[in-house]
Image (cartoon, rainbow, N blue to C red):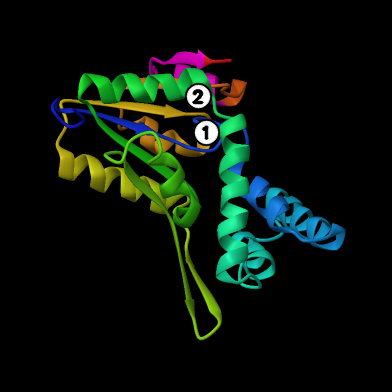
Amino acid sequence: MIGTTDVLSIFDFDKTLIREDSFRLFSLLASENLWGKVSVLALAVSTKVGLISNQRYKESVLRIVWLTKDEKERKSLLQKLYSELKEIENFEVVNSLKNHIERGDRVVVLSASPSFYLKPYVQFWSEDIKVFGSGLQVVNGKIKFDNLYGLRKELCARSIIEQEKPSEVWIYTDHISDLPIIKLADHVRLVKPSAKLCDKLRQLTIKYEIVSS
């Protein structure tokens, strides 16, 4: 049963538990025509090259492809998304997550992806997994997106560790942006890491294992 040990394992979602960027997949599936797809891809490129913030990128995409849909359309979209995510699961990392659960470790998925699709999907594996993602509220037709990205993601991880008080912390991630969280861990497992991340960890004398290359 999950939570019977005092070991904490923290998993990133995008490009770790799944092999691609789930928000980009979501935005393309949600786009109803070619112009919509071009628009969300242009926004993705803009944030990649630093023209707009990650926050503005996600808010803009959600305004284009999510707010315009009714509840029936949203439900249908999420079912399609879950089917697509199933096809791109990283089985080696998902199996590691399930092994932590079987050992009774506490398992957390921490991601900047929106909670409205992240949490239901992750809890297909186990309802006992704690899921922290970006929150979405719509107030008077305006989006309020609580983006769990960068410093906010680090602070969330620190808060989780402080509350759980584990004897060991495991981290599974793919990206150098999670370096502050990696520094909090006792065991680091990397998924297709960049040379830049590996070099940085060697400089910091942080031991790591590559679990999926």
Query: Circle 1 is placed at which residue position?
Result: 176
Quadrant of res 172: top left
Q: Give the range drawn in magenta.
A: 197-211
Sequence order check: which comes first, mark 1 or mark 2?
1
Nearest the camera: 118 or 160? 118
Dot 2: element: helix
User: Which three-letter amino acid code belongs to the residue tagged 1?
Assistant: Ile
Nearest the camera: 120 or 202? 120
What label does residue 160 carry, if any? none
How far is disc 1 from disc 2 in space, using C-alphas?
9 Å
1 vs 2, front mark: 1
* 132 is higher (above) or lower (below) than 104: below
Residue drawn at x 57%, y 52% as measured from the top left:
78
Q: Residues within 10 Å of mark 1 (few under 14, many from 20)?
A: some
Left or right: 4, with 129 as reference point:
left
Nearest the camera: 155 or 88? 88
Residue drawn at x 30%, y 41% as measured from the top left:
127
* Marks 1,2: beta carbons within 8 A: yes
Left or right: 188, with 31 as reference point:
left
Can residue 42 be seen here? yes
Can residue 186 be seen here? no
* 211 is higher (above) or lower (below) than 147: above
Residue drawn at x 32%, y 49% as measured from the top left:
156
Task: Point out residue 75 in the picture as x, y percentages from the top left corner.
Answer: 55, 59
Task: Point out residue 145 in the picture as x, y percentages from the top left corner.
Answer: 49, 66
Dot 1: element: helix
Residue extending farthest right: 34
Query: Circle 2 is placed at which residue position?
Result: 200
Residue drawn at x 16%, y 45% as measured from the top left:
163
